[in-house]
Image: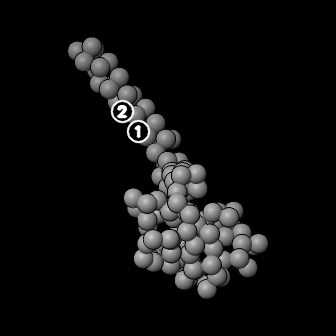
Amino acid sequence: MAGIEDMRGLWQLGAIIIVLLALVIGIPAMVWGPSYLRHRSEARLRAEGLPAMATILALEDTGNRFNDLPEIIIRLEVSAEGRPAWQAAFHRVMEVPDVQFFVPGRRIPVRFDPQRPEQVAFAP
């Protein structure tokens, strides 16, 4: 009988370790993962995307804050040579100097994925 109780104790210890690992790895992945993936996608678009110009239509606060700086969704109307205009958006943590640059009506350079043109990145 002692062997069964030892196995039960090992099983419980293993379950506790798995839960703790899931918390240690899972919580940071849920908190920082989306921002990291967005950053990687934007870097890929800047390197490989096609150039276009976009007009800022609107700014929308996501409610997220990073070091007390707001994350903003910038809604755009994008136009590229040989394509009809389309709408897209990208996220950006808005720093104080950015406020004067990202205003509705302003045209900005962007890069887009030709396979999924709704994916754009600011390309200064």
User: Is residue 59 in sight in this rendering?
Assistant: no
- SS category of the residue bearing label 2: helix
Residue 5 is left or right of residue 96, and the answer is left
Image quadrant assignment for residue 56: bottom right
Residue 19: mark: 1
Relative depth, front residue between 52 and 17: 52
Residue 50, horizontal then vertical, whole percent: 52, 60
Say whether marks 2 and 1 touch (CB < 8 Å).
Answer: yes
Q: Nearer the viewer, residue 89 or 49?
A: 49
Q: Measuring 53% from the left and 52% from the top, which residue is drawn there? A: 48
Secondary structure beneath label 1? helix
Residue 117 position by quadrant: bottom left
Disc assigned to residue 123: none
Residue 97, above or below 23: below
Q: Where is residue 40 in the image (x, y as percent from the top left)?
A: 54, 50
Question: x and y percent of residue 35 in the render?
Answer: 54, 56
Pick the front one: 20 or 114 = 114
Q: Mark 2 points at which residue?
A: 15
Residue 90 drawn at (x, y percent)? 53, 68
Report the number of numbered marks: 2
Residue 68, image quadrant: bottom right
Looking at the picture, which amino acid does disc 2 mark? Ala
Residue at 46% over, 36% down: 21
Amino acid tagged 1: Val
User: Around disc 1, counting alpha carbons within 10 Å, would you say few (fewer than 14), some (14 to 19), or many (20 or more)?
Assistant: few
Q: Tell me the quadrant of the picture where the N terminus can be found.
A: top left
Q: CA–CA distance between discs 2 and 1?
A: 6 Å
